[in-house]
Amino acid sequence: MAEPLGVQRDLACFELPEIGRLHETGDQWEPYQLLDPEEAVVLPAQIYFADLQGASKPATTIRSYGMDLLRWFRFLWAEDVQWNEATRVEARDFSRWMTIANKPVRAHWRNKMKPVFAAAGPQPRTAIRGPNPITGKTGPGLKYAESTRSHSETTLRTFYDFHIEEGTGPILNPFPLDRSRRARRANAHHNPMELFRNERQGRYRPRVPKRQPRRIPDEMFNALFAALKHNRDRALLAAWVSTGARAQELLSSSQDDTDPGQQLITVIRKGTRDSQALPASPDTFVWLRLYQEELRQMDAPRGRHQPLWWTLRRPLRPLNYHAARAMLNRANDLLGANWSIHDLRHTASFRMAGDRQLPLAHVQWVLGHAHLSTTEIYLAAGIDDVIEEVLAHHARRASQTERPPAPAAGYNPVSLGVLFGGRQ
């Protein structure tokens, strides 16, 4: 049952139970299902997923929303509260718990299947508290990130808004709008001569700090590229860093999407779902040709509509994002770095935006940005460049302090040296 407003839960001792799961069905009409502890389909989530699909949301978005709903339903199941009886007390306590609690540590699936050999199997990647000494990036922490909590709040608020409009949910949304937004819409009475302000939306929505994108320096990229073991991985990295495509955009390409003669790779854009041909570097197609020759020897499926990227272990399967990230993590472990696949897109963006002979509007088209202001963030100097220039400034200041100032015109430097105790 829902708690009264004056009752406080003991969240310090609360642990989110690992009950229920998000099931990938493989059915294009219903790609994901939210299952309760008895393995029964959660009907409110199923209806909401169908509405998302009707709004042309891809399966990846449904999965992302489903993970947020799974976390919320686990909280309600642990507190014995029905989803349509949840109040703002439950929403408040859930938001407090996500702010303070540690993320659950899940064992690797290989360790679950073979507990005897758990020590020899892959171990969970440990949370990094500080910045990486190689990349300067902060790794995944012990707590839920602000972006994760913000995405969760948005998902749950829209989930209840949908059921309230359908008449199947509670009377009030447990995740309300901010108090300043209750009586008016966002950016009400906006002056068209001024920029739109980022007004707070949800009451329990955290403020997400703006993070400046990081690029991989050329020497670090060369080291990362040298740490790869297979031609497929080298072709992937070369394609990502030259086209600026998103990870899934490139991984979903088919064999007919490459045009070595024109140096183009066609991808399906994430937001618009448009087909767009992106220019790639010549070395991308060199590594791609070597990889395709290896696939031919492995008797991989061939055809215009067959996937372009495959796993290298039998049975051959289309390469997905998780396998590609594991490939990059193996190279990172050799260097002690924590670069991500999306950092390759940032690197390509900085390289193209830094070329003065390449118009910024062309960079916007390649990256698929809806607004030019999004592309302009790559015109700013990178963090590494700023640190290098400021350190050089301090070095110049130190050298000027050690060197005595030059005498004014008309004075003999030798006489001044004798007068002030210097060398003759």
Image (cartoon, helix red, strand yellow):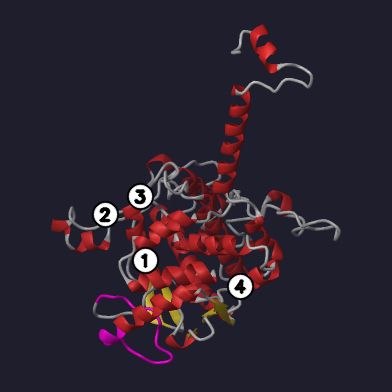
Residue to which mark 2 is pinned = 123
278 vs 205, nearest the viewer: 278
Disc 4 element:
helix
Q: Which mark is residue 21?
A: 1
Query: What span is colored magenta in the figure?
Result: 295-313
Q: Decide: is 390 above or below 224.
A: above
Who comes first in sequence, dot 2 or dot 3? 2
**Place of residue 131 in the rendered image (x, y in percent of width and height, measured from the top left):** 45, 43
The answer to whether the residues at label 2 and label 4 have Cβ atoms under 8 Å apart is no
Report, in whole angstroms, how far the alpha carbon at label 1 lies from the one at label 2: 22 Å
**Place of residue 33 in the rendered image (x, y in percent of width and height, measured from the top left):** 41, 73
> Within the magenta stretch, is there residue 115?
no
The residue shown at (43%, 54%) is: 220
Instruction: Please state which of the two labelled residues, at mark 1 or mark 2, is closer to the viewer.
Output: 2
Three-letter amino acid code of the residue under disc 1? Arg
Residue to which mark 4 is pinned = 366
411 vs 210, nearest the viewer: 411
* Residue 35 shows up from this direction: no
Q: Quadrant of the C terminus?
A: top right
**Place of residue 110 in the rendered image (x, y in percent of width and height, measured from the top left):** 23, 63
Who comes first in sequence, dot 4 or dot 3? 3
Report, in whole angstroms, how far the alpha carbon at label 2 lies from the one at label 3: 16 Å
